[in-house]
C-alpha cells in the first residue's frame, strides 16, 4: 500500500513538472472552430510533436482537481499503435477527455470501455449473435428503410437533411435490427444524442449537463431492461432475442451486459451513421465533379465512396485510453494513470498515410482510414452495419434526388467527441416534378 501511494505521488509530481504544449487542443474555442482551422493545428503537431502533453480540457461538466492533462496522439501510425497496445493503454477508466463520476462511466460507456478478460468474453458472445441469418435480415431492412425515408421527403423539395434523413436512417435501421417498437424509437434517438453532445448548447437547451446525461442513461437502461425481460418471456426474430439466447460453452450474456451493448448500438450506431450521412451529402454537394464521377458507375464505385465519406467525416473525432503502467510512446515517457487521447480527426488527414488527404476523393484507394478504429481488440463491431446503411442511403439519394444541393451553411456542433452536424438545409427538384417533366418532354 505504501509503495502504491508513493508511486501515485511520484506520478503526480511528474505530470505537474511537464510543460504543456503551446498549441491549444483543450479549449472550448478550439472545438468551436471549423474542422479546417483545427486541421492547421493538427498538421503542425503531426510534423513536429506527434505525441504531446496538453492542459486539461475545458468541459464544465465535472471538475477533477487531480486532472493534470492528457497526451495528444495525432498521427496515423501512433494512433494505430496506441489502439493495439491494449495491455499498456486501457479503456476502463473512460473513453472521453473528461474525468467523469464512476456511476456515469458505468451507465454511459458499458461494453466499449471494457478491458480483457471481460471484454474478450463479452465480445465473443456478442459476435455470436450476428449470424448469417441475422445479417441477411438486417440488410433487407436497411434497403427498405432507406427507400421509406427518401419516399417521405422526395415530394417536398426542401428539408433539413439531418432531421428528415440523417437522423432517421440509423434510428429505424438499428431499432428494426434490435427490436425496438415504433413508439419508443424517437425517445431512443433523442436520448442517445446526449452521450456525445452534452457540450453542445443547441442540444442541451440550458439543461445541467451531468444531470441530463444521467437522465438519458437511465431512460435508455430502463427501456432496455423492459425489452430484455419481454424477449426472455416471448422470443422474437430480432437481435435482442439473439443476444438473450447467445451461448458459448455454457456462458450467456447477463442482462446488464445486454443493456450495455444496447446503449452502445443506440449511441455509437446512431451518431456515427448520422454524422457520416450529413458530412457525405455536404462533401458531394461541394464537389460536384466527385458526385458526377460516382454516378457514372454507381454500383462499382459506391463501396469506395463510402470509405472516403467516413474518412472525410470522421464522425468520432477522439477516443481516450489510460496508461496502466509506465511506458514509452514515440520516445515520450508515459506515466501510469496518464490520459492518452487518440485524435482520429488528425490521423485521417495524415500526409504520411494518405496521398493529398486534404482532397475529398471518392476514388481514393487504398484508404486506410481509422474511422472504425485502428484494429486490435476494440475495432468497431458495427463497421459493416455502418457501411451497409451508408451505401443504401446514398444510393437512394443519388439516384432519386440527383440535383440535391445544400442551402447556406450547416449548423455544426462544438463537442470534442462526435463531429456533429446539427442542422443542414438541402433543396432538390421534387420527384413528382421531375417525372412530370419527363412525360412532358416525351422521354
Image (cartoon, helix red, strand yellow):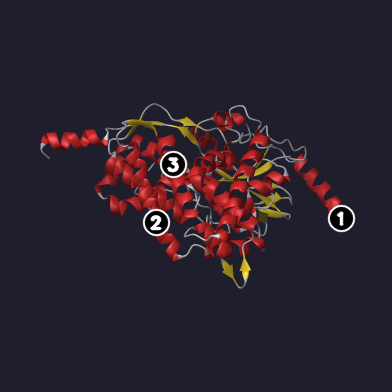
Q: Which mark is residue 3?
A: 1
Name the residue located 64 percent from the left edge and 39 percent from the top edge: 215
Callout 1 touching callout 2 (CB < 8 Å) = no
Residue at numbered disc 2: 139
Q: Can residue 358 be spotted in the picture?
A: no
SS of the residue at dot 2?
helix
Residue at numbered disc 3: 168
**Closer to the camera in the image, 97 or 72:** 97
Q: Residue furthest right?
A: 2
Foreground disc of the pair 1, 2: 2
What is the x, y in percent for residue 5?
85, 51
- The mark nearer the N terminus, 1 or 3, is 1
Q: Within 10 Å of the Cα at label 3, are there few (<14), some (14-19), or many (20+) other Cα atoms?
A: many
Name the residue located 52 percent from the left edge and 46 percent from the top edge: 347
- The mark nearer the N terminus, 2 or 3, is 2
What is the x, y in percent for residue 241?
53, 60
What is the x, y in percent for residue 374?
53, 54
Name the residue located 47 percent from the left edge and 45 percent from the top edge: 182
Using residue 174 as the reference point, say whether residue 198 is left or right of it. Answer: right
Q: Residue furthest front?
A: 233
Amino acid at each position: 500500500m505504501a509503495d502504491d501511494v508513493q508511486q501515485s505521488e511520484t506520478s503526480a509530481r511528474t505530470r505537474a513538472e511537464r510543460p504543456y504544449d503551446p498549441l491549444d487542443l483543450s479549449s472550448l474555442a478550439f472545438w468551436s472552430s471549423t474542422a479546417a482551422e483545427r486541421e492547421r493545428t493538427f498538421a503542425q503537431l503531426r510534423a513536429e510533436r506527434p505525441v504531446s502533453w496538453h492542459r486539461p480540457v475545458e468541459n464544465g461538466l465535472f471538475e477533477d482537481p487531480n486532472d493534470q492533462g492528457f497526451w495528444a496522439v495525432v498521427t496515423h501510425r501512433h494512433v494505430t499503435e496506441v489502439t493495439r497496445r491494449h495491455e499498456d493503454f486501457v479503456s476502463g477508466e473512460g473513453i472521453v477527455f473528461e474525468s467523469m463520476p464512476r456511476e456515469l462511466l458505468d451507465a454511459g460507456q458499458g461494453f466499449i470501455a471494457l478491458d480483457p478478460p471481460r471484454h474478450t468474453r463479452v465480445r465473443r458472445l456478442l459476435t455470436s449473435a450476428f449470424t448469417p441469418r441475422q445479417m441477411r435480415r438486417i440488410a433487407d431492412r436497411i434497403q427498405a428503410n432507406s427507400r421509406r425515408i427518401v419516399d417521405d421527403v422526395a415530394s417536398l423539395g426542401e428539408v433539413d437533411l439531418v432531421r428528415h434523413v440523417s437522423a432517421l436512417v440509423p434510428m429505424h435501421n438499428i431499432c428494426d435490427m434490435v427490436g425496438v417498437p415504433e413508439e419508443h424509437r424517437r425517445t431512443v434517438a433523442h436520448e442517445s444524442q446526449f452521450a456525445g453532445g452534452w457540450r453542445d448548447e443547441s442540444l442541451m437547451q440550458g439543461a445541467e449537463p451531468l444531470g441530463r446525461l444521467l437522465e438519458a442513461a437511465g431512460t435508455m437502461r430502463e427501456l432496455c431492461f423492459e425489452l430484455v425481460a419481454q424477449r426472455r418471456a416471448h422470443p422474437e426474430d430480432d437481435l435482442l432475442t439473439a443476444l438473450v439466447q447467445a451461448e458459448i460453452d455454457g456462458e450467456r450474456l447477463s442482462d446488464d451486459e445486454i443493456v450495455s451493448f444496447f446503449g452502445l448500438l443506440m449511441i455509437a450506431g446512431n451518431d456515427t451513421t448520422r454524422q457520416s450521412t450529413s458530412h457525405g451529402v455536404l462533401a458531394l454537394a461541394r464537389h460536384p465533379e466527385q458526385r458526377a464521377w460516382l454516378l457514372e458507375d454507381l454500383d462499382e464505385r459506391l463501396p469506395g465512396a463510402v470509405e472516403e465519406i467516413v474518412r472525410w467525416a470522421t464522425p468520432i473525432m477522439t477516443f481516450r485510453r489510460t496508461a496502466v503502467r509506465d511506458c514509452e510512446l514515440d520516445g515520450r515517457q508515459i506515466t501510469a494513470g496518464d490520459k492518452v487521447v487518440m485524435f482520429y480527426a488528425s490521423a485521417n488527414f495524415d500526409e504520411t498515410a494518405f496521398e493529398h488527404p486534404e482532397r475529398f476523393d471518392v476514388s481514393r484507394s487504398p484508404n486506410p482510414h481509422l474511422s472504425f478504429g485502428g484494429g486490435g481488440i476494440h475495432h468497431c463491431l458495427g463497421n459493416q452495419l455502418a457501411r451497409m446503411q451508408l451505401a443504401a442511403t446514398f444510393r437512394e439519394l443519388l439516384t432519386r434526388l440527383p440535383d440535391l444541393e445544400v442551402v447556406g451553411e450547416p449548423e455544426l456542433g462544438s463537442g470534442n467527441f462526435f463531429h456533429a452536424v446539427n442542422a443542414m438545409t438541402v433543396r432538390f427538384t421534387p420527384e413528382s416534378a421531375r417525372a412530370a417533366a419527363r412525360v412532358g418532354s416525351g422521354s
